[in-house]
Amino acid sequence: MTDEKKTPALRVADTDREEIAELLRNAVAEGRLELAELDDRLTAAYSAKTRAELDTLTADLPAVPGVTAEPLHLRTKSGTVKRNGPWNVPDTIDAECTSGLVKLDFTEANCPHRVVEVEARARSGSVVLVVPRGWGVDMDQAWATSGSVVNKLRAPHDPTKPLLRVKGEVRSGTIKARHRYRSFWGWLTRQPKT
């Protein structure tokens, strides 16, 4: 008789619960779940302690197509690394820059997550986050030794849109969050308000 060791159940974080809650809300919008089912499943999602408990809540729902679960790692020593255009945002991003530029442009990205954790480190370079209007960026856990941590977003965060939670440090560079700049031609051909 063999003595099998049981693998401990994987504990979940608040971000995992929020991700499942978002999938459930989308299922209602698509007509896959009724509102009464949503209430029951949201209650179970927010009280779940393990991954297995969360998985049972979405077992009868299709997975979100094209969403990568693997964390994204972007690093450069003196060059430029960009992620832009249409791309799938994972729930964890690691961006490290020694003296170049790491630029993450979320304006055309597909982000199914309510919260995205961003670990940003800049020695003498820059990590730049370009986000659509309505998205939120929390930089309370990012700090600078002699560089700067700058959040240029002026509009309030829409709670139905993603929140980037940025952690990390700057030695003498910059971590910056901003909206996309308007192009010169877009500004030039803008119609006057009537």
Image: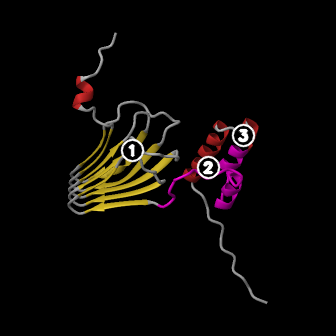
Q: Which residue is mark 1?
A: 106
Q: Residue at x 22, y 24 (%)?
A: 188
| 107 sits left or right of 184 in the view | right
**Compared to 61, does 178 lie above or below?**
above
Could you tell me the amino acid type at mark 2? Ile
Could you tell me the amino acid type at mark 3? Asp
CA gap, disc 1 to disc 2?
21 Å
Q: Pick whichever, 142 or 106, lies toward us.
A: 106
Q: Nearer the viewer, mark 1 or mark 3?
A: 1
Which of disc 3 and disc 2 is earlier in sequence? Answer: 2
| 65 sits left or right of 163 in the view | right
Q: Pick whichever, 8 or 61, lies toward us.
A: 61
Return the x and y of residue 8 as percentages of the image width and height: 65, 71
Return the x and y of residue 36 as percentages of the image width and height: 76, 37
Furthest toward the bottom, the residue is 1
Q: How many marks?
A: 3
Give the number of the disc on residue 65.
none
Q: Identify the image quadrant of residue 190.
A: top left
Secondary structure found at label 1: loop
